[in-house]
Amino acid sequence: MARWAVIGGGVLGLSLAHRLVDRGEDVTLLEAAPELGGLAAAWQLGDVVWDRHYHVILLSDLRTRGMVADAGLDDELHWVETRTGYYGPDNVLRSVSNTLEFLRLPGLNLIDKLRLGGTIFYGSRIRDGRRMEREPVVAWLRRWSGGRTFERFWLPLLRAKLGEAYREASSAFIWATIQRLYAARRTGLKKEMFGYVSGGYAHILSCYAQVLTGKGVAIRTSRPVSAVRPSSDGGLEVHGRDGSIERFDQVIVTAAGGLAADLCPDLTPAEHERLRAVRYMGVVCASLLLKGPLGPYYLTYITDPATPFTAVVEMTAFVDPVEIGGHTLVYLPKYVDPDDPLLAASDDEIRAAFWPYLVRMYPSLHEEDVLAFQVSRVKRVFAIPTIGFSDAMPPMATSIPGLHLVGSAQLPFATLNVNDTLGLVDGFIAGNVA
């Protein structure tokens, strides 16, 4: 029996630990934060505990549904059909929840809309992700949708998600998004629906952790690691920031590229260079707890270039408000470069920047409607799929025997979501565990 350490207690680290212990390994999971979950962790917002960031489960998310089942929560998974909104430069909020509503959108003529629909349909039929990463996303979208559709529809959405880094992204970025939207249809499901578990990811993670500890996984929170180094007598040493040193036969680091390079100083210069070359986008995500609903839409896309946030995600248009104490939960995400000054702004400063625009979208909203306003900041959320990214991304294996790197930088043909992240676990186990 090998002794394994998994560094990082997010969904990825927890699932790796689960799969390893099921194969008879001795597993210790180390998480720097006081709680498990990483990007899926929950927090206290006013008098409510819910997810720090917005998450949904799709009917086609079979890996995520498997994790929910492993946690014993199948009966607490609820499925809901949602509506989608659209807010453009004309300051009008519209529904785009079906094809007819989509065709009524202003700013594009019928030919533009047909080309836009054709672009999405064509992208759904492509199966080779490597083919898509050979061409910039701008060139691909202009070619298939046309210049006017690109400028008025695609460009605001690309900027909202990637900032000015959209110029460096390959067409694999938009292809992965389309593939996820069409996943249910490819598996024979008539329509896509969104799911959530009562209690949110806090409940999922708590139950999942109990399953893991019951199987023998040693879970240690508030245990930040300072370095992973080869041991003089074989194996690997995990150095804690508290001065502790533990020896393991195998270690998996689930951190982002630059942090993984910092934690593993004995990797080769070429490995360090590859890890630090991965470019990430961060997020500033404001959570609002409101007295009442804003509207009927779970997700409202925003193409107005003046917007200070990426979208409006009204969680309680999807999740039963009873889960949120009868209140309304809204997320206002803004994707940013890791060096963006917004990451250092206070909650009050971000509220001052976001609030006027939110009131413009929803004129009936007033200050007294806000029960809580809280901001989450993460510097590195997902890796930007640049041209040829699958050839340049860091491999899971390293030059140090027993040391493995598994993280979102190894998702060249996927969007960052729980289901695709769990796909990394399948790949790692298949290649490294007998």
Image (tube, grey):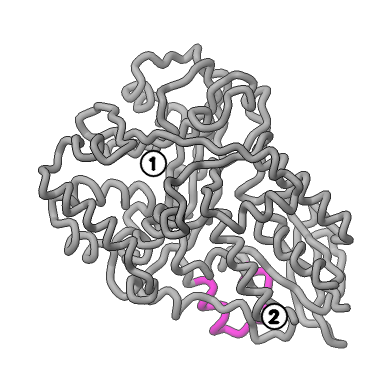
Q: Which residue is mark 1?
A: 310
x then y, percent, for residue 431? 65, 80
- Measuring 52% from the left and 71% from the top, which residue is drawn there? 276
Q: Eyeballing the image, is 169 above or below 107?
A: below
- Measuring 78% from the left and 60% from the top, which residue is drawn there? 30
Q: Residues within 10 Å of mark 2 (few under 14, many from 20)?
A: few
Quarter of the C terminus within the rendering: bottom right
- Measuring 79% from the left and 51% from the top, which residue is drawn there? 209
Question: Is residue 34 among what the camera can see?
Answer: no
**Label 1 SS:** loop
The prevailing secondary structure element of the residues shown in magenta is helix
What is the span of residues highlighted in magenta in the rendered image? Answer: 260-276
**Spatial separation of the CA atoms under disc 2 and disc 1:** 39 Å
Residue 272 falls inside the magenta stretch: yes
**Is 418 displayed left or right of 8 in the figure?**
left
Q: Nearer the viewer, residue 315 or 30?
A: 315
